[in-house]
Image (tube, helix red, strand yellow):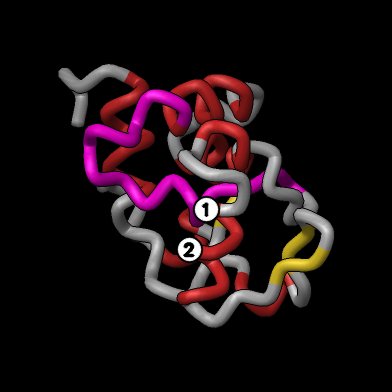
């Protein structure tokens, strides 16, 4: 992955998030060795719609759908998550830890 830019690395990790699971911007950043770059991961997600990335599975560190305004329609992000069995109330994922997928624990050190 050495010759790929940061956004491409983010997309590769995001594509590995299993169906019915979520992760955070910060968890992806930390996994990529850029722990202070959660905002950059968010920017990558904002630009990912044409790249077939499941951006709806990436939320903030406490499970709030902070990126929902980047999806078409008023509740598309929530609907996509609910279709995968994740309950969302007031833009907040219920049972966040139950659904949380940590790439640092789930993936090998090298992607």
Give coordinates of residue 8: x percent, y percent: 27, 28
Residue shown at 61% from the left, 41% from the top: 68
Residues at discs 2 and 1 in contact (Cβ within 8 Å): yes
Query: Which residue position is annotated with label 2?
Result: 80
Mark seen at residue 44: none
Residue shown at 56% from the left, 38% from the top: 30
Q: How far is the residue under mark 2 from the one under mark 1?
A: 6 Å
Give coordinates of residue 58: x percent, y percent: 54, 49
Query: Which residue position is annotated with label 1?
Result: 76
What span is colored magenta in the figure? 46-61
Give coordinates of residue 84: x percent, y percent: 47, 76
Residue shown at 38% from the left, 48% from the top: 14
Q: How many marks?
A: 2
Between 74 and 93, the one lying in front of the other is 74
The quarter holding residue 39 reads top right
Between 33 and 56, the one lying in front of the other is 56
The quarter holding residue 102 reads bottom right
Between 9 and 2, the one lying in front of the other is 9
């Amino acid at each position: 992955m050495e010759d790929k830019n940061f956004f491409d690395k983010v997309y590769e990790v995001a594509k590995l998030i299993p169906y019915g699971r979520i992760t955070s911007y910060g968890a992806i950043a930390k996994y990529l060795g850029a722990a202070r770059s959660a905002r950059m991961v968010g920017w990558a997600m904002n630009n990912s719609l044409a790249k077939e990335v499941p951006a709806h599975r990436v939320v903030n560190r406490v499970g709030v759908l902070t990126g929902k305004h980047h999806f078409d329609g008023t509740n598309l992000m929530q609907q996509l998550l609910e279709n995968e069995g994740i309950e969302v109330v007031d833009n907040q994922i219920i049972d966040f830890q139950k659904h949380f997928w940590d790439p640092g624990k789930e993936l090998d050190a090298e992607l």
